[in-house]
Structures are given as structure tokens and as C-alpha cells.
Amino acid sequence: MTSHPAKSHFVVRDSVKLHHLDWGNHGQHPVVLMHGIRLHAHVWNHFGRRFKDRYHVMALDQRGHGDSGWGEDEHNYQFEDFYHDLCAVVQERGLKRFTLIGHSMGGRVSMLYASRHPETLERLVLVDITAGRPPAPPPKPDAKSDAEADLSRITETPPPGDFESHESAATYLKKIMKLAPPEIVDESVRHGMRQIENGRYTWKYDPALNRRSQSSSLDFWSIAKSIPTPTLLQYGSHSNVVTPELAARMAETMPSCAVERVEMAGHGLFTDQPEAFANSVERFMAKS
């Protein structure tokens, strides 16, 4: 895997230093990428390489993730916090009209932004996320509280743990992400881990995110209904987050929403099927 040519940029909001990758090509149509919980900006590297000569691609590290700063505690990781962070980056970079792509939690943040600032968006892509939640699986005998109903149960990065090396972490993750190309997993791990005091490596996100409340007063179905932006909803054939029923409801609820299923892909479909994900976005962007 060749090294990425993206450059790091930082924006400070409320004392939190927010990092994002900029793939260059300023002056072309901007595309802003928002990752899901416990992931990081580099999960979009394949997409960035693919489109860096066509669009101005920017990938954000949301607060508490990757190379961005951490909030004071779990109460600083609400949708409104992530939304205002996105607004700060958009304002700092002077974006007037752009395409917004959001995965999972980042997709919910993107929906919130799209409902409040439709005049700034050319297109919206929701990656394996809808306004609703799938039915919770039956509780396991050893499950703690309602954690099994949390969307984080199927994100790419499992709860905090440490490893002796990037290689051992990648080996562990490949057992979970069996559909993903090995080199994509290797790259994600290489950028998504930090070394701790004992010399071992752990995931590059704030452990307080695991204590973040999943409840919200926001009505995302009403939010979805209010979004006029042409939208593409992608979902994986093996997703545990988006069911065909939820996808169909989104198409009925949103004023302009197309749905595309990506085969042989789970929740992190841009990692499981990076080419199919990119091709889907490319087709959507080409529509008049």
C-alpha cells in the first residue's frame, strides 16, 4: 500500500483541536467524509486516493478519534458536539457548496447538518445508517445492561485492548473483518493505533466514547424528512445496522433518496468492498 499524499489540517473549537486530512486539488468540488464511532479519518484513504485528482477530498477525525483532541468526558460526545465541530471545519475551510459523506455515527451527524444547512450541500451520502435502529438481538447471558443494542457492537474497532504490535492487532481485526481486503485492514490499523506507556499499542480513540450515552432527544426520522438534498443511502448485504425495511422507509421518508445495496459487505462497507463503495459514489456524483 503506497503512502497517502494527504496533508493534515487542524481547527480548534471550544479548546478541542480537530484534525482533518486534505487530499488537495483545491478549487474542485469539495467532498467531506465523516467516519463512524471508534474509527478515524484514514479509513477513507482508498476513496481519497481514488478521487484526489477529481475532487477536493477532506476526511475528518471527529473529536475523541484519530489525531483530534478529546472531550473532557463522555458528556462531550453528543451529536450536537460532533455537529458543531463539522460546522467549525466547514466555516474554517470556507466551503460554500459540497458533498457530504457520513458513515454510521458520522452519517447521523451528516443528517443533522443537512437538515440545518441544505443550501450548502450538493449531495449527501449515508453509508450504512438510517434514522432508525434495527431490532436488538436476543440478549446474551453475559451481556452487560443494554450494550448489545448499541450500534457500536458492529463497528470495525472492538472495545479498548492493547497489542504488542500493529501486526498482532491487524491479525486480530482480520478475524472480525473477514470480508475486507487484508491490505485495507493493515492500513487502517497502522493509522488507527497509538503507543502507550508500557510500549504496547491501543486503538487511537478516547475510551470515554464507550461510556457515551446512545440515547438522544433528536428525532432522526423528522430530520430525514426535512432534508431536500439529493441523497444516496448505501447499505451492506451483510449489515447488522440497516435492514431492507429501514432502507425502504428512508426512501419513502426523505424527499430525494436513492438506495443501493452493496453486496458482500457489512457495516463498514467502504472497507469490506472499497471499489464497490467508490463506484457507487461515482455513479451518484455523475447524475445530473
Image (spheres, grey):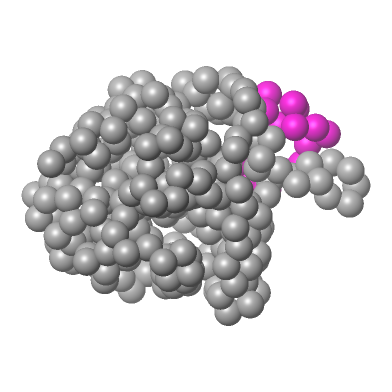
Left or right: 143, with 200 as reference point: left
The answer to which of 171 and 32 lies nearer the viewer is 32
- Image coords of residue 207 (percent x, y): 66, 58
The image quadrant where one finds the N terminus is top right
The answer to which of 2 and 26 lies nearer the viewer is 26
Corner quadrant of residue 242: top left
- Image coords of residue 89 (percent x, y): 48, 65
Q: Which residues are magenta?
A: 158-171
Give the farthest residue toward the right: 198
Report the residue at 65% width, 35% height from top.
189
- Image coords of residue 131 (percent x, y): 26, 55
Report the residue at 64% width, 31% height from top.
3
Report the residue at 81% width, 46% height from top.
195
Q: Is residue 174 above or below residue 4?
A: above
Q: Is residue 263 above or below residue 246?
A: above
Left or right: 271, with 205 as reference point: left
Taking the magenta stretch, the answer to whether it contains residue 164 is yes
The answer to which of 243 and 91 lies nearer the viewer is 91
Report the residue at 43% width, 70% height from top.
91
The answer to which of 247 and 166 lies nearer the viewer is 166
- Image coords of residue 181 (percent x, y): 52, 20
Left or right: 34, with 128 as reference point: right
Taking the magenta stretch, the answer to whether it contains residue 163 is yes
